[in-house]
Image (tube, coloured by chain):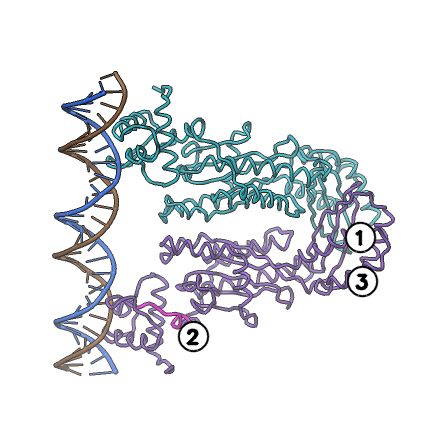
Chain colours: A cyan, B purple, C blue, D brown
DNA sequence: GTCAGCACTCTATGTTAATGAGTGCTAACA
DNA sequence: TGTTAGCACTCATTAACATAGAGTGCTGAC
């Protein structure tokens, strides 16, 4: 059934999809014949369109309407037809500036990145916080604050800092804390967060002689802290951009979109399903498993520290998406993001 | 013009507003005559309704429609007419459970509180993070992590912990850091964050003999850190609840609402304008200055640590709001929130 | 002062007709 | 054999119009 498309059909299909992405309205044969100089009459184009519909690349909302691209049509467009989009100077600057802000924390960088992309593309952006399982512990210390409060401070080799307050009901002996710090550092620094499971923690705990209750509490805090760094989270930006698109001028559809996007677990699942082997990935319409997003496309890009992929940034918009621009924007952004993250974690020496 | 309302008019007005809040549809005289046992015919009620309209408490969308309350009508209702709402056991439990979660950080408590309220009321909730200007510094330390990195850790008496990474390009002498820590603690602990302005920082800086560049960097970080704790921020919860209300079934209105609520600066301004002398405050319709919220009401409640008011939690919904329930919910929540915060900061001894 | 009755107003809903965009098909042409 | 002009046909959209129903305001009787 699937045949290689002739050059003319490809040209026509491209013209139709370009036009539909622009105007959001079914494209008629006359429009294509006029606007794009193919040297063909509308009748000929009509025939070709009928063929393209038979092949599954186009759809017709009703008999007397023009054609709109099907998911399959968009797929072909993305894979073969569309022309690369060249970012404008203004767009390049927007990304550069966002990534050059003075930023202290990973999460801040992540958020700026997703903000920039949502502004640039005018779609909704999701970005997953890095999975830090492969990071190692570089520094771990319990610091007494006052009689009843201590602070657990943990720093990873990727530069993530986390602290937890530890409350105790008897004052901790400073010698004990000192001893504890030495043991913990001995046992834990250099390990990846993944390696520090509850079994290993139990083993370490056994080696320490101390009030059981206090120890359990402290070890509990350490585990929580590690889990916290390790846990997947994500940020959303530009959800209300969806209002810009006529396909969401229907209150029910807008409602559906918002309520989907509010469910973080589903978004995480969505990102997890993305094929991580390619840098840029495009899911069109029903290609994703969520029926709520059946009329959406998702373009994702991986981002990394060095050559370790640590997360994904994704753009969600209607299937009638400006794929070329979205992809170019994401490519350019992740390049910059990767550089910024390198700097953040290893200093300017990597410049 | 403004005359004291007779008992009968008050009863009728109350019935109309109760009904309208329930059904979101203009209320006719017949409906009131039937549903509420006032022992009056619809004709009589019609006359009273005409009076109430003349007085400005009711409005008529068009001649042959029923009446809807005006802002003034809602105002009277809130101040005098409505009956106190008694929270159900389930509702009470929801709040209690939310506030009994294991929570480590102020911001987490704040977020749980606003989440609980948005779930309970089914409106949008905003909550301002505490202003910490009156907090004092309890602990401040620079901790060397490795050759090029140190950590600035700052703890306030209200238990807020903040840390910043400090990057230096020459290794810091550990004796110097020790000395610096002593001086900084000497000069800064016990001061409120407000008191630590740039002038005072300059004075302290002068007393320390050290490489100017390093010192400037460190002091810069300390200032940033304090500003960070001190800066106003806020959380939003349940924005999409607005879709539940027929007054926002119009895409344009929904758009307007979302785009307003996205502007944090405006929300902060809104909260700042609230009369802080009362615990619970209600702004109805155009009583707030933002035209985007002209058809919304905002109910706010202060929350405190001890008897120091530190922030506001607010509920935004259509003017046709379940005021009684919203107010009861907020009252009950803030009581619990205040207790939780006390515990978080001073431990269980305040139980 | 209350209220039954009635004319009146205005929205909401449904029906019908007109309009027009766009198609598919046919037949003629290169 | 591919292209295209021409035409009948389809279907969504819009406007115009009629109808039904909810609710009012007013009048006059009690």
Q: Can marks 1 and 3 be said to lie on one chain?
A: yes
Q: Identify the image quadrant of residue B26.
A: bottom left
Note whether A260 is above or below B89 in the view shown.
Answer: above
What x and y, as percent, mark residue B154? 73, 54
Q: Which residues are magenta?
A: B67-76
Note whether B14 is above or below A63 in the view shown.
Answer: below
Number of marks in picture: 3
Image position of B75 (left or right of B213): left
| Figure quadrant of the N terminus of chain A | top left
* Element class at badge 2: helix
* Element class at badge 1: helix
Q: Chain of mark 2?
A: B
Q: Which mark is residue B80?
A: 2
Q: Which mark is residue B215?
A: 1
Q: Which residue is mark 3?
A: B203
Mark nearest the camera among 3 and 2 is 3
Q: Can marks 2 and 1 be said to lie on one chain?
A: yes
């Amino acid at each position: 059934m699937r045949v290689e498309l002739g050059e003319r059909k490809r040209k026509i299909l491209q013209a139709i999809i370009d036009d539909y992405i622009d105007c959001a309205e079914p494209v008629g044969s006359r429009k294509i014949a006029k606007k794009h100089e193919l040297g063909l009459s509308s009748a000929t184009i009509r025939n070709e369109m009928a063929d393209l519909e038979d092949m599954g690349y186009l759809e017709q909302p009703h008999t007397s309407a023009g054609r709109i691209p099907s998911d399959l049509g968009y797929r072909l467009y993305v894979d073969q037809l569309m022309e690369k989009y060249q970012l404008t100077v203004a767009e390049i600057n927007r990304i550069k500036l966002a990534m050059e802000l003075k930023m202290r924390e990973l999460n801040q960088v992540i958020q700026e990145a997703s903000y920039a992309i949502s502004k640039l593309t005018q779609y909704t952006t999701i970005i997953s916080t890095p999975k830090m399982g492969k990071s190692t512990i570089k520094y771990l210390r319990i610091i007494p604050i006052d009689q009843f409060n201590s602070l657990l401070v943990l720093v990873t080799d990727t530069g993530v800092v986390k602290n937890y307050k530890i409350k105790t009901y008897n004052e901790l002996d400073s010698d004990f804390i000192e001893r504890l710090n030495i043991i913990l550092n001995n046992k834990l620094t250099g390990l990846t967060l993944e390696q520090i499971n509850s079994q290993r923690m139990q083993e370490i705990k056994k080696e320490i002689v101390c009030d059981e209750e206090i120890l359990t509490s402290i070890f509990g805090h350490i585990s929580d802290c590690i889990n916290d760094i390790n846990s997947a989270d994500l940020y959303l930006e530009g959800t209300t951009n969806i209002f810009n698109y006529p396909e969401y001028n229907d209150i029910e559809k807008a409602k559906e979109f918002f309520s989907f996007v509010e469910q973080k677990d589903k978004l995480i699942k969505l990102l997890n399903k993305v094929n991580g082997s390619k840098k840029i990935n495009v899911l069109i319409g029903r290609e994703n498993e969520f029926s709520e997003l059946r009329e959406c496309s998702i373009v994702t890009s991986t981002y990394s520290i060095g050559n370790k992929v640590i997360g994904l940034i994704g753009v969600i918009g209607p299937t009638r998406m400006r794929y070329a621009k979205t992809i170019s924007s994401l490519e350019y952004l992740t390049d910059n993001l990767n550089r910024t993250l390198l700097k953040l974690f290893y200093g300017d020496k990597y410049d």
